[in-house]
Every structure is written in C-alpha cells, then in structure tokens.
Image (cartoon, helix red, strand yellow):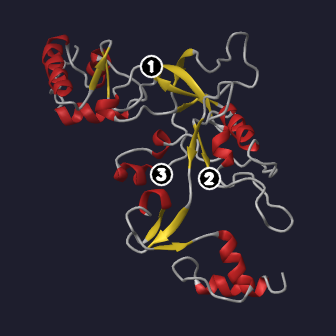
Amino acid sequence: MKRPHSKSPLPSKDDLVAFIGQQPGKVGTREIARAFDLRNADRAALKTMLRELADEGRVEQRRKKLHHPGTLPHVVVADVTARDRDGELIAVPTEWDEAEHGPAPKIRIRIPRRPRPNEVAGIGDRVLLRVEDSGDKDEAVWKKAGYDLTDQLLLLGLDIKMFYAGPKEAIMHGIYRQNFGFTDIVIGRKHADAPYDDGSDIWDGLAAQRKFDELKGELLIKPVKVGFAAFYEELGRVGLVDEYGPKGYKQVSISGRELREKLRAGQLPDPRIMRPETARILIERMKGK
C-alpha cells in the first residue's frame, strides 16, 4: 500500500530568493516547483509570489526565466568590444539596464586551445557565452563595497618602452595602446621629449599634445592632455596651473628639473613635495653628478 503524499508547504519569498541566487544560471517555475516538491495545484500561488518578487525588484524575469537582478545569467548573449592586456577578448552583455544596475560587467572570453572553424570570435561580433566565475576575487570585500572590481575595471596601464624620439612618438604610443583596446591615453608635458646635451629644450613642453590636433588620418584613442601642475596650499594637493593659477592660489613648484638642481646642491626640497628622509638619500646618491 502506497503512503499518501504529504503536501509540501509553499516556500517563503526569502526561500525563493535564496534558491534562485544559489543556481548557476536562470531558473524557471518548473525547476523551483521540483526543488520544493510542489504540486501542480501550488503553481498558481508560486507564480503569484514570483511576480511579486519581480515587482519588488528582488528577482529579474527574462523569457520566463528568473535570476537575481544585476547579475549575469549562466548563458548570455554578449557583444565583443575589446581585448585585455593579455590579448584576450572582452565582451559585455547585449541586454543590460545601466540605469538600474550600473555599468555593464566585462566578460573575459576564454578561447579553446584548439578551436574549431568559425569558433573564434573577434571585436564587433555578437556571441553566445556560458558564464563562469573566474574565482579571482575576494567575495567578502566586494560584497561590502556593493560592486565587483572586475565589473568596473578593464585596462589600467600598459608598459611600453619609451624611445624619447620626440613629440611624434606620442602618436606611436597612442596606436600601440589603441591596438590593445585602450580608449584614452594621458599625454603630459614633454612626452617622449629629451633635451640637448646642455639641458636646453629641443621642443616646447606641449608639442606632443599638438600632434594629436594635426593628424591627417583617424585615431580612435583620445588623448587626455595634462599641462603644467603645482602643489597648492589651498588645496593641500597638486593641481593644474591653468585651472588654479588664475584663482590666485599660492603654488609650490614641482618641476623635476628644479628638484634635481636642489638635490645636487645638497638642499632639501619643500617637505610638502618630497619627504626629507627621501631627499637625504637622493642628495647622497646625486653627489658629484
């Protein structure tokens, strides 16, 4: 004789949210009903609870599947937009509500060692991806911060040899970084510049910045032009001369040339510019040079 099937109680909303969050991808009503051993008669009440959770913003529903809002589903359609510093492709989800969830997360695409024909994507392609956690982050730290570092940052810096060949070299640096997927490059004073043997300037300090205005071809990377800077007492930090000079702020020069001259002469620079402990070491090192 078969035992009568005891009716399982409906899960609470918190139970549903916790279950959906534990799944590697999207889940639907069928998977939830099976997990909580619900009968067909309970599905109407279950669907009502799920609609209420969606209205409250605690879960997100797409194509009759549910997952936590602001997270990637297990399988996602994405657009390949760039390469990282290691040359690996980076994609962003095709559907993402930035107004609701902030910037779209970056997905690093892992290419098989021996890909099949037509299996390797390129920048500009739309692809179907299976999303996996890379495991290279501290969950506790970023949960407290409220966002994931790997979702916010893609490329920060690229070390490329400087030849000091003059202002035109800045264009070469821009092309290199553009090929690695960078969108911006900082061009400061005397970029790739070198003086004559007597220390006098060959080019003026902002010559490299003007090269980007004189281009006849197209360069997609944007130069961030940084001019003269100084330490300002009113700010307690370094600021641009063009911005704070006209306001009458009192400046302390941070010129590298002036600092080197003081150190060679055995003089301690302003402690707001360089720590005395560091300056003494450099003074000893630069004696007779």
Farthest residue to the right: give it.
197
Give the answer, above or below, for where 83 lies relative to 61. below
List x then y, in percent, for residue 223. 59, 40
Mark 2 residue type = Gly
Q: Quadrant of the N terminus?
A: top left
Nearest the viewer among 103 and 188 is: 188
Q: How many marks?
A: 3
Which mark sits nearer the N-terminus, 1 or 3?
1
Left or right, 231 with reference to 64:
right
Local SS, label 3:
loop
Mark 1 residue type = Thr
Q: Are marks 2 and 1 in contact (CB under 8 Å)?
A: no
Q: Can the viewer see residue 230 in this picture?
A: yes
Q: Residue at x 64, y 17 (%)?
A: 121
Identify the residue position indicated by label 1 in the image: 94
Q: Characterize the local packing of mark 1: few (<14), some (14-19) or many (20 or more) Cα atoms within 10 angstroms.
A: some
Identify the residue position indicated by label 3 in the image: 138
| Separation of marks 2 and 1 at Cα, in angstroms | 36 Å
| Separation of marks 1 and 3 at Cα, in angstroms | 27 Å
Mark 3 residue type = Asp
List x then y, in percent, for residue 51. 17, 20
Q: Are marks 1 and 3 in contact (CB under 8 Å)?
A: no
Local SS, label 2:
loop
Mark drawn on residue 34 = none
List x then y, in percent, for residue 15. 23, 34
Which mark sits nearer the N-terminus, 2 or 1?
1
Identify the residue position indicated by label 2 in the image: 188
List x then y, in percent, for residue 50. 19, 22
Local SS, label 1:
loop
| Separation of marks 2 and 3 at Cα, in angstroms | 35 Å
Give the answer, above or below, for where 11 lies relative to 115. below
Give the answer, above or below, for where 153 lies relative to 264. above
